[in-house]
Image (spheres, rainbow, N blue to C red):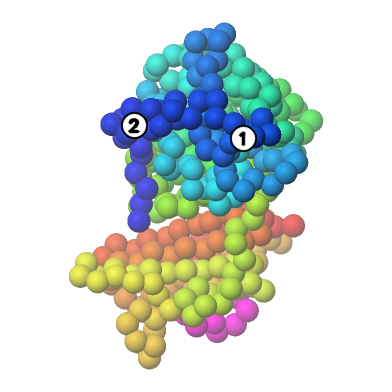
Amino acid sequence: MARRSPSRPRFALALAFTLALLGARGASGALAPGWHTFALVETGSRTLLYVPPGLAAGPVPAIVFLHGQGGDPAGWVSELEPIADELGVVLLLPKSDASIGWGVGADDVVLEEALARLRAEVEVDPARLGIAGFSAGAAYAIEYAYSIRSPFVAVFAHSSPYRTVVRLADPVGPPPLRLYYGTQDPNHLNGAPGLLTTMLAGRGVAVTSDLAAGYDHSSWAPDSFRDGFAFLIGRPAPPCLPDGGALCLRGGRFRVEAAWNTGEASGAARGVELSDGSGTFWFFSEDNLELDVKVLDGCALNGRFWVFAAGLTNVGVRLTVTDTATGERVEYRNPRGTAYAPVQDTGALHGCP
């Protein structure tokens, strides 16, 4: 199911919830698990800080997340909290200085004060401190991490418009960047992924991309934020375990999944491995094969793993290939009522040695 952008009516409810937890602390004086709100005095803004339950003692991973244009951090509570709980990561969600969004007011001051508050409240592991953002927030995350200050080990930009980086704040060891776009997102259609990749890769930044077919700017692949956050703190995707559904190809590194939809019914396809790098799926009956897939090692040719697929169906199909070593994922969709178009993606996945 696609995720949709948080709507404004949820802001007030979520914000009231976080304000109710302001200052909540455990018996040891440490922040209690849950959401907390802190005022940012220098700009009059504020930041939310989330501590997941059961957080391990010692330095912990943390992610700074920047909301979109005209948004509010409280609108992202329900979207991001389950991910933080799963990954065991502290979240810092500052509010932009100007109501219109990031890059207009004194947002560098907002981030400096929010980061200072984070470090005062939680023992942060500097080797697992990342920054992420959505839309305009993603663009400012790129600008801040590469042009202004580089305390971050990685950057995740979800649905970002293009933003120019003239020079790197840390030209010696810039953090890697992961981009996510839906194929119907106007920022993708306007060429932002290619422009950002060309610009930053030319300045020595390692850039990877996650492109999800069929999604736009206000809806996204369900695991897109989870995968991006895992990238930030160095947590790979879950290992591929054969379960009769997914294919585990090339030594189990690549998890291949398919789902079908007729309009009247839908379900997960069942996979059958044919070789280390290839397999097939059936939808309705195991003696009626519908979709063949293979993952090829093209590293020696163009530094990518390739995905090829061919189908014998005209039902709706969503094919997903995940590199469990890096968390990178690609997705391919076939519209319902259309003969399955062959996939020959020779630039599908990074992660080559």
In the image, 56 versus 310, the foreground residue is 56
Say whether residue 98 is magenta.
no
Image quarter hosting the N terminus: bottom left
In the image, 118 versus 163, the foreground residue is 118
Q: Residues within 10 Å of mark 1 (few under 14, many from 20)?
A: few
In the image, 35 versus 210, the foreground residue is 35
Q: Amino acid at mark 1?
A: Gly
Residue located 22% across and 67% down the image: 263
* Residue receiving disc 1: 26
Dominant SS of magenta comes to: strand
Residue located farthest toward the bottom when viewing the structure as drawn: 287
* Residue receiving disc 2: 13
- Chain part drawn in magenta: 271-280
**Where 339 falls versus 126 (above or below)?**
below
- Residue 341 showing in the rendered view: no
Residue located 55% across and 25% down the image: 23
Kind of element beneath mark 2: helix
